Image (cartoon, coloured by chain):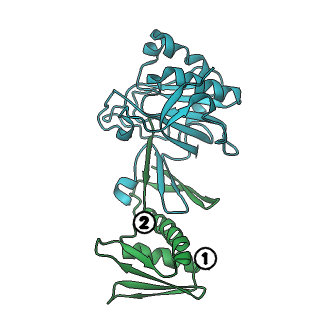
Amino acid sequence: MDSTLLNIHAILPRSRVNGPGLRLVVFFQGCLRGCEGCFNPATHSFEEKELRPAASLLEGRMAPGVEGITVSGGEPFLQPRGLRELLAAARARGLSTLVYTGFALEELEAGPLMRECLPLIDLLVDGPYRMQMPEETLLPRGSTNQRFHFLTTRYSLADLMMPGRVELFISGDGTVKETGFGSLTRTVL
Amino acid sequence: MSFYTVIKTELSVKKYLICALEELKKRGEITSFVASERKDAIEVDRDGDIINISREKAGNYQLGGDNRVVNAFSNRLKQMYAYESIKDNLPLDFEISSETETAGEIQIVLKG
């Protein structure tokens, strides 16, 4: 069976601030929500950014020590078939799965395609970003209205205190990649 | 959602260029450098290879010299420039939690 193509904004091979432990992060492209103050406005457009087969997205990308994948965006559940295939591929490799969404869990449960993804998710962080309610601790969420749903026993709240809020990668050619729950480079570089 | 962005480093502030060159000298990656205030230029000696850094009309600094040497050095200089610039501009409510360098990439985790 052909794999569903995912429209991807970016893939970060390893991060320590996007969930428990060392994680590969996939940022989906496309979101309709338009939350005021969104961290990632460049992910809103539905233009094709980078099309990748979902089932093989992880092949050749797993850095040593990575314990799971985090799916961020954009809105992952607007590509539910591809999301399900990606999560299944992660599970087949023994990787944990964390997914961010602007939908509420109850909305996901009501949608047949979206609901099929839920058994493949260890930790779901749901709810829209509210810039008036910023998360100020080291929990990996943008605003305090967003809820952590532990859909399996793999993680608990104690696993969610991150070593930092922001992570910077300065590559050998001077390119700076920044991720996390805040931005420095907008003002620094 | 978590934040994600990619930024290309431009060599625009002399202060951070000097800091980056000092760091490269300390690490033994360049032999010496001389900054000329009058010409707004810097001459770098990299084990006998000379690289000239000067400000172009657009305002950024550019490197001149043997292409072989300049291309590799330019990348490394931009990396150290970005590192020095980030460290110097950390907001007061942020501190470095960890800093590692693996496979030619510098990784910094910040607590806020």
Q: 10 Å neighbourhood of mark 1: few (<14), some, or many (≥20)? A: few
Q: Are marks 2 and 1 on the same chain?
A: yes
State how far apart marks 2 and 1 are (Cα): 18 Å
Identified by mark 1, the residue type is Arg
> Can residue A72 be spotted in the picture?
yes
Q: Report x, y in % for residue A112.
A: 49, 10
Q: 10 Å neighbourhood of mark 2: few (<14), some, or many (≥20)? A: many
Tell me the cyan chain.
Answer: A
Q: Residue furthest front?
A: A2
Tell me the green chain.
Answer: B
Return the residue at label 2: B85
Secondary-structure class at tag 2:
helix
For the point 35% across and 53% down, the residue is: A186
Return the residue at label 1: B27
Identified by mark 2, the residue type is Ser
Give above or below for B88 relative to A177.
below
Give above or below for A176 relative to A102.
below
Q: Report x, y in % for residue B94.
A: 44, 54
For the point 35% across and 71% down, the residue is: B60
Q: Quadrant of the N terminus of chain B?
A: top left
CB under 8 Å between discs 2 and 1: no
Q: How many marks?
A: 2
For the point 37% across and 29% down, the residue is: A31
Task: Indicate left or right for B80 with A13 as reference.
Answer: left
Q: In the rendered structure, the residue with mark 1 lies on which chain?
A: B
Q: Report x, y in % for residue B76.
A: 54, 69
Secondary-structure class at tag 1:
loop
> Can residue A16 be spotted in the picture?
no
